Amino acid sequence: MRKRIGKICSAGLFVVFFASFSPIYSQPEDWRANLPEPVLADEPGWIALYYETWRLADMNRIQTPAGWAIGDCRKAGTLTSWAQAFVAGFGKYLQNAHPQIDHPMDGLDAFYALQEPDGTIPLILDEPNQNRIQMPIFAWAEWQYYLQTSDLDRLRQILPVLDRFYGAVKRLHGTQAGPYTSGYAGNGMSNRPLGTRLIDLTAQQALNAYLLNKMAVQCGEPKLAQKYEREHVFLSRAINSMMWNDDDRFYGDLIRDILPINHWSIAGYWPLLARVAEKKHVAGLLAALQDPTNFNTPHRIPTLGKHSIDYSPHGDFWRGSVYPPMNYMVIKGLDANGLTQQATEIAENHLLAIYLTTISYGMLYESYHQATLYYPSNRSRVDFVGWTGLSTIALLIENVIGVQVNAPEQLIRWVLHRNDQHGIKNLRWGPDCAFRADLLAQARQAGDPSYRIFAKGNTDFTLELICDNQSKRYKISAEKEREIHFP
């Protein structure tokens, strides 16, 4: 990968924005010094981009009635609920470092405070409710935060909010047969081709049901847990029996409840994350993802596959451009189905393309051109953090370096796949981010079967190491560095 970058740069295609992306950002002297410190010896530019993303996020912060929040760049001075849910996916790594943002979920709390008696929540913070439903993914954001912090008090507080919201979405868009009717503005993907029953909105409700069941179990609410287990089974059956196209081996929308229609939209990957897809569905989705005549473009993953008659070679918003939150969704869906290697490949391709685009143009973008590794899409907003932080922060930590936290189980899982020195320092997690972990894998020669790992923290935890088909758990004792040779 480093050779590839060198060849591109030596060809004179880029002007390196050295002032913003020099290695000095690996050790910032401002509030960012208290953030997690990723280590990636072969990709110092990706580390610099990580810190630059946080700088831009700081510039885009917005004060809400609930407190300061990272802006989602819809427009100056306002927030959207679905974008804030995506922002929470990387905001959880703030770990009390920012001098003004007291809590990474304050942006979402500002929306929860405006919930109507009928369960609806505004789509846009400073506009009337109007019952506009667009990517209702609060439960996903909250569950990710819970895994990072094990904050059960918060889970108990927001569970009734999310339960009422689920009911509102079902009342407004649910059907007796199961598939959900069209959400506002293409359910967030504003100009994508769509039917009257949407695969993404239906699968997002299935995801909500799956996660609300898990939340209810954690909160000791067995009746609520059973309710959402039934909802998940019902929606899974509807999606797999009505919205799966056996000929294309792909999920699509419906025209009413009768006619399946496949636009080859990235929306068809939501069932992976919702734990709806069965073995044959996973295989079909993966085949489309790996097909260079469809979704396997130079910069992965286009929002429409090239098999779609509506695919635009220029991107044109949601007709082919690469959108970071959609990549994040697919990558996490692959992870959820045990396809870790494929998830890693896409994450590294995506991060490389964002990095090359940034050193060329000196800024982050809302979306990227799918046909190159170094160009934004044709209708993309600039300096966008925003959901692009999912790629340069969350995917960097969780899929490129491979470290994921499960605080309720006092567990950190590390998927090892790199040969350079890599890891993460000052990773804060648990209640009020009081726990700290430092994890470092020493560089190894290609073909070396074992890793030399150094792990320590300020509390006892379990470290699960995974490489290829092997995994093993190790007990890490507080304030004692442990050297591990794995496998």
Image (cartoon, rainbow, N blue to C red):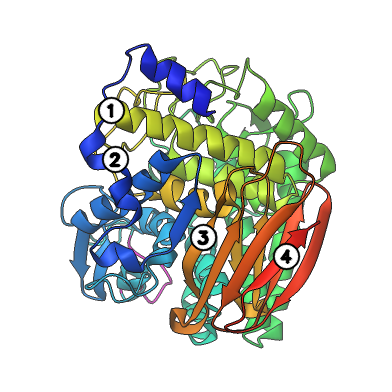
Disc 3/disc 2 C-alpha distance (Å): 19 Å
Disc 3/disc 1 C-alpha distance (Å): 26 Å
Which residue occupies the foreground of this view, 120 or 284?
Answer: 284
Is there a contact, CB below 8 Å, between mark 4 and mark 2? no
Disc 1/disc 2 C-alpha distance (Å): 8 Å
User: Which badge, 3 or 1, comes first in the chain's sequence?
Assistant: 1
Image location of residue 229, percent across then percent down: 73, 69
Kind of residue indicated by mark 4: Ile
Indicate left or right for 472 with 382 as reference.
right
Q: Which residue is mark 3?
A: 424
Is there a contact, CB below 8 Å, between mark 3 and mark 4? no
User: Which badge, 3 or 4, comes first in the chain's sequence?
Assistant: 3
Q: Residue, x 29% and y 25% (percent of image)?
A: 360
Kind of residue indicated by mark 3: Ile
Residue segment shown in magenta: 114-122
Which residue occupies the foreground of this view, 15 or 254?
Answer: 15
191 in relation to 40, above or below: above
Helix, strand, or loop for circle 3? strand
State which quarter of the image contains the N terminus: top right
Whether residue 484 can be seen here: yes
Please check the rendered image and state whether residue 314 is part of the magenta-colored stretch, yes or no.
Answer: no
